[in-house]
């Protein structure tokens, strides 16, 4: 074991000497530190000083570029990234950041060119693939975008921007069923925030209401649609998770009361039972709630929903409406 | 005979009255969503006592004797009207929230300047070794810091109130690096996100063509150029949707309650940030991604060692 360690150290030393591995402990320690702490101005100061002492330090130049770009100063960042790339022309990451800087300077053709160069050096560079895809989306080049996003997802299964934009690209190609499937995958992993609201909007426009945005209180909230076990009025697990969100919001905001409105086309009795089931699930977990905070309504009709210029009839659904006082 | 006719007439009138009273109820529970479009929504439903009955589904919590409570809305049109009213209220609130955020940001700027000045004064006093000046500068600094903290707390509280989220959760999101505008945007209390996924006329941001497909904070440099996507100038990594922080509160949103929610792209700082509901299985989906000296490559062994 000791022999192996000694040999490994010796090999590392040899490789360092011959330049196979560039070791710059200061940059590798302090660069990520300033980035993580968001101390960009301090980073610029420290690394600019370091660069003066060693103008050929590509790593130091790279970090100065990163700090300037983080400060939204692409004009200042660009010369440093270019310096780093000149020192190490085979570094895909340097090319990638030149691309990002071109984007910030609104130079979109050069941005794409830079990502393509980065990918020629490292075809598995995740962010270069991703941002190349974004550029295609911006130009409505859906098929090319789809290729990039599929590549990203192959490398990074839960990459949120690739998952969402894959749906956008499929929609652009008119492959609507695949768009729906892609958006549902995205929403399964990232079911809240503004992107989830947009994904839900797209989904609903395609006639899929497995997710819906509801105005709860004064807020737009994405929820999984209430689904019941086949032939029963018991909720499935994923629906219960949405009710946890409602209950938690009502727990924080004591003035938040919500109508539960159930629809079942041709069967008012089932609609009523389902409205009660939803309310009872919330109350079972929050016995301190006054049931009057969850008034019920039920109708033996389909729910009529307007989205965009379309009107949809949901045969069975549960709607949440904030009580206005 | 005359008496008999009189009785029949009275019976018929009673029957008509019964039908007249019973019709709306029967109507409400069966069909015809177009009925009574002028009806006002009711604020309070009489749903009986279901507290703590533990009967998750199928129970009858409607009160003594199994009496069926009446629906809060007598027809779908009433429900639709109530929904529109709630949306209009939220829109007005979102506009007020946006103003409060702008005012809060301005106030924080002012308070931060006061802190900076006080710090500079303290440094000068310390350098001069002037004890009286040090004491005065320290007092000024304490007051400035308190003012800054108070300003932050009041804006946190304003957003928390409209979002039905704890103040501490908002503070933790801010600590994680989000501005109030971003928090309001991601929590759906900002005019730009309030209208998403609703009928026309609810808030702004309903047009998908202008959506920023890369989520919060992105797209800053390309605004006004009609670009749909953004880039993260700080990390170069896909941004994690929603908000960080929140201490795992389910009031934040479905990502905190879902058993399937994920923590973001490889290398994103949000991994393991309290998302998901399965005690750790779903929060950090990509641990060991590209932040550990492997650059941004999906290759093992490639990359350049820069995070």
Image (cartoon, grey):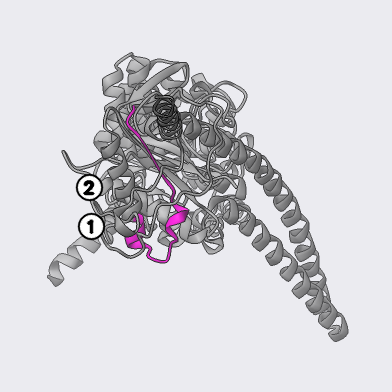
The residue sitting at 59% across, 21% down in the picture is B225
Marker disc for residue B130: none
**How far across and how far down the image is residue A177, in percent?**
27, 21
Under circle 2, the secondary element is loop
Q: Is A293 covered by the magenta stretch?
A: yes
Q: Which residue is mark 1?
A: A11
Q: Write down the region rendered in magenta.
A: A282-301
A257 or A95: nearer the eye?
A: A257
Labels in figure, total? 2
The residue sitting at 46% across, 55% down in the picture is A292
Spatial CA distance of label 2 from label 1 is: 65 Å
**How far across and how far down the image is residue A170, in percent?**
32, 20
* Residue A54 falls left or right of residue B108: left
The residue sitting at 79% across, 74% down in the picture is B122
Q: Chain of mark 2?
A: A
Quadrant where the N terminus of chain B sits is top left
B29 or A24: nearer the eye?
A: B29
A81 or A214: nearer the eye?
A: A214
Under circle 1, the secondary element is helix
Q: Chain of mark 1?
A: A
Going from N to C along the chain, the mark reached first, 2 or 1, is: 1
Q: Which residue is mark 2?
A: A234
């Amino acid at each position: 074991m000791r022999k192996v360690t000694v040999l490994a150290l010796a090999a590392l030393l040899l490789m360092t000497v011959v330049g196979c591995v560039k070791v710059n402990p200061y940059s590798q320690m302090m660069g990520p530190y300033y980035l993580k702490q968001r101390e960009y101005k301090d980073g610029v100061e420290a690394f600019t000083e370091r660069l003066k002492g060693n103008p050929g330090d590509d790593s130091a130049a790279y970090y100065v570029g990163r700090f300037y770009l983080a400060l939204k100063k692409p004009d200042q960042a660009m010369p440093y990234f270019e310096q780093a790339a000149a020192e190490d022309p085979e570094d895909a990451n340097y090319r990638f950041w030149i691309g990002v800087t071109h984007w910030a300077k609104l130079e979109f053709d050069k941005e794409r060119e830079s990502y393509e160069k980065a990918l020629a050096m490292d075809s598995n560079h995740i962010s270069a693939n991703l941002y190349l895809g974004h550029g295609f989306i911006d130009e409505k080049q859906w098929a090319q975008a789809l290729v990039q996003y599929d590549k990203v997802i192959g490398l990074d299964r839960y990459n949120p921007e690739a998952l969402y934009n894959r749906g956008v690209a499929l929609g652009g190609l008119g492959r609507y069923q695949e768009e729906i499937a892609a958006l549902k995958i995205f929403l399964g992993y990232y079911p809240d925030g503004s992107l989830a609201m947009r994904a839900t909007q797209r989904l609903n426009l395609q006639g899929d209401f497995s997710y819906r945005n509801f105005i709860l209180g004064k807020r737009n909230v994405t929820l999984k649609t209430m689904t019941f076990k086949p032939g029963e009025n018991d909720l499935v697990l994923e629906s219960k998770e949405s009710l946890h969100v409602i209950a938690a919001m009502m727990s924080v905001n004591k003035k938040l009361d919500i109508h539960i409105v159930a629809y079942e086309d041709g069967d008012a009795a089932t609609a009523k039972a389902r409205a009660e089931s939803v309310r009872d699930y919330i109350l079972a977990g929050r016995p301190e709630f006054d049931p009057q905070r969850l008034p019920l309504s039920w109708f033996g009709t389909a729910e009529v929903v307007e989205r965009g210029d379309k009107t949809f009839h949901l045969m069975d659904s549960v709607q949440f409406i904030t009580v206005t006082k | 005979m005359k008496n008999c006719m009189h009785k029949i007439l009275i019976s018929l009138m009673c029957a008509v009255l019964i039908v007249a009273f019973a019709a709306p109820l029967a109507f409400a529970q069966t069909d015809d969503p177009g009925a009574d479009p002028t009806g006002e929504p009711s604020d309070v439903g009489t749903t009986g006592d279901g507290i703590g009955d533990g009967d998750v589904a199928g129970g009858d919590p409607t009160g003594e004797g199994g009496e069926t409570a009446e629906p809060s809305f007598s027809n779908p049109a009433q429900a639709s009207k109530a929904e529109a009213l709630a949306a209009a209220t939220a829109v007005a609130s979102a506009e007020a929230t946006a103003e409060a955020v702008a005012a809060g940001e301005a106030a924080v700027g002012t308070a931060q300047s006061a802190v900076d000045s006080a710090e500079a004064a303290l440094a000068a006093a310390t350098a001069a070794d002037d004890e009286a000046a040090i004491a005065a500068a320290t007092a000024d600094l304490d007051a400035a810091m308190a003012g800054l903290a108070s300003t932050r707390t009041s804006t946190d509280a304003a957003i928390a109130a409209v979002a039905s989220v704890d103040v501490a959760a908002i503070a933790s999101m801010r600590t994680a690096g989000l501005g109030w505008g971003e928090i309001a945007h991601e929590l759906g209390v900002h005019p730009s996100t309030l209208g998403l996924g609703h009928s026309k006329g609810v808030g702004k941001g309903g047009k998908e063509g202008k959506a920023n497909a890369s989520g919060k904070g992105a797209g800053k440099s390309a605004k006004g150029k009609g670009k749909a996507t953004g880039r993260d100038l700080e990390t170069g990594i896909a941004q994690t949707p929603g908000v960080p922080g929140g201490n795992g509160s389910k009031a934040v949103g479905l990502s905190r309650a879902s058993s399937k929610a994920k923590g973001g792209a490889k290398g994103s700082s949000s991994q393991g940030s309290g998302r998901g509901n399965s005690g750790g299985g779903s929060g950090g989906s990509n641990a060991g991604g590209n932040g550990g000296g492997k650059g941004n490559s999906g290759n093992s062994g490639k990359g350049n060692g820069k995070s």
